[in-house]
Image (cartoon, rainbow, N blue to C red):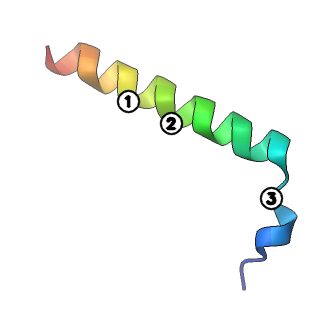
Amino acid sequence: SYDHRAVNGADAGRFMTYLNALLSDVRRLTL
């Protein structure tokens, strides 16, 4: 099962940065 404790701040930050970049790309492609 997934353990939330396995995700530290650095990993969470990288994931959010990735999501933000992905969303920005989608917005740019749809405009």
CA separation, marks 2 and 3? 16 Å
Q: Residue at x 85, y 53 (%)?
A: 8
In this figure, which residue is indicated by the disc labeled 3?
Answer: 7
| Marks 2 & 3, CB-CB < 8 Å contact | no
In this figure, which residue is indicated by the disc labeled 2?
Answer: 19
| Marks 2 & 1, CB-CB < 8 Å contact | yes
To which quarter of the image does residue 14 belong?
top right
Q: Relative to 14, is 22 on the left or the right?
A: left
In this figure, which residue is indicated by the disc labeled 1?
Answer: 23
Q: Is residue 13 above or below residue 3?
A: above
Q: Where residue 18 sits in the image (x, y, percent)?
A: 58, 32
Q: Where residue 17 sits in the image (x, y, percent)?
A: 61, 29
Q: Crowdedness of circle 1 by 10 Å Cα count: few (<14), some, many (20+)? A: few
Q: Secondary structure at mark 3?
A: loop
Q: Residue at x 38, y 30 (%)?
A: 23
Q: Crowdedness of circle 2 by 10 Å Cα count: few (<14), some, many (20+)? A: few
Q: Is residue 30 above or below residue 10?
A: above
Three-letter amino acid code at disc 3?
A: Val
CA separation, marks 1 and 3? 22 Å
Three-letter amino acid code at disc 2?
A: Leu
State the mark number for residue 12.
Answer: none
Q: Relative to 20, is 13 on the left or the right?
A: right
